[in-house]
Image (cartoon, rainbow, N blue to C red):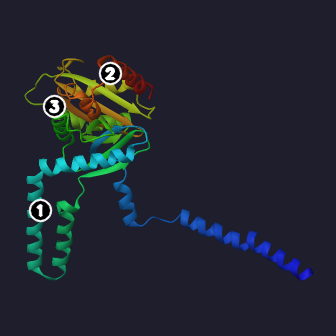
Amino acid sequence: MSLDMGQGTKRKADDNGPASTIDKRQKSRQQWRVPRKHEEGVKALNVIRPGDSGIWATCNKGKERACIGELRDLFTAYADNMYEEKITAEAMEAVVATSEAQSAGGIESEIQSEIADMRQPGSRQLFTPLRVDVQCVVFFKTVAPVEPVSFIKTVCEDAMSAARRKRTRWAKRLSPMTLMGRASEEGLEKVATEVLAPHFHRTPFQRRKFAIRPTLRNHNILSRDSIIRQIATIVGPGHEVSLKDYDLLIIVEVYQNVCGVSVLDDSFERLKRYNLAEIFDPTPANENANAERKEIIASSAG
């Protein structure tokens, strides 16, 4: 009896003593393990960084994954058509680079061949979907030759001209972002200065009528009014504010800790504010007005 009790006590000590300590140490090592270089690279691809460009998309609640899938297919199809010549030219450059490297022979040939493979358009992802910690919102990071503003305008123009051929189910508003930065006064200043210059700081001077449309989600540092004042200052004197009859629309999208700025032309309203759901299935005017007021109130509340 005493022997059995002793064994039972010993097993209990093993369960709660050294073995438990070892488990904790193993968990600790796993938790604080230094990431490897390639893991850091993958992580970097999955976050929005200053200097990025891309496309915000809103969708139905709980349909973020489905929205990513349908927009990825749609965007890829358009990119293949819109940028075919540029992609083909890049492919030819890669082939030439590979041939020249192979003629050199040796290790240098292998290195150049690997570089050429990395540059192949087929292996480069023009649209990288990112899940952000905001409900009903997804983001696609883009790379050249994709230019988000002209790209999204083309998508919406085609949808408008053939609204019966509905190609998306969950996607709603598309917001092209020419340049992204940090959601702070300094970050917005840097991004807006670069994006607005080609449109408002031309030589010779060209007077433009403009409007500013900020959107804020899950953010409480910048306010709607402060963004409008800051952007108007960067636009500078000599231009005219016109909320309805504008030549150019400046959109500012702020999501959590990132912001983006783009300049759109006067087709924005005609194209249902780049809202695919509205293009395919327009909301009655009175309901649309109510929805717009709610959106303004929500964005003002941050």
Task: Residue at 39%, 31% (x, y): give it.
Answer: 216
Specify which label sits upstream in the sequence, 1 or 3.
Answer: 1
Q: Name the residue beneath numbered marker 1.
A: 91
**Quick one: label 1, few (<14), some, or many (20+) residues within 10 Å?**
some
Residue 177: give its label: none
Coordinates of residue 58 in the picture (x, y in percent)? 35, 37
Q: If the image is split into quadrants, where does the N terminus sit?
A: bottom right
Q: Of helix, strand and loop, which one carries label 2? A: helix
Q: Residue furthest right?
A: 1
In this rendering, the answer to whether 98 lies above or below 44 is: below
Q: Name the residue beneath numbered marker 2.
A: 288
Separation (CA) of disc 2 from disc 3: 30 Å
33 with respect to 275 (left or right): right
Specify which label sits upstream in the sequence, 2 or 1.
Answer: 1
**Is label 2 in contact with label 1 (beta carbons under 8 Å)?**
no
**Is label 1 in contact with label 3 (beta carbons under 8 Å)?**
no
Coordinates of residue 158 in the picture (x, y in percent)? 16, 37
Q: Give the amino acid type for the residue marked by disc 1 in the picture.
A: Ala
**Is label 2 in contact with label 3 (beta carbons under 8 Å)?**
no
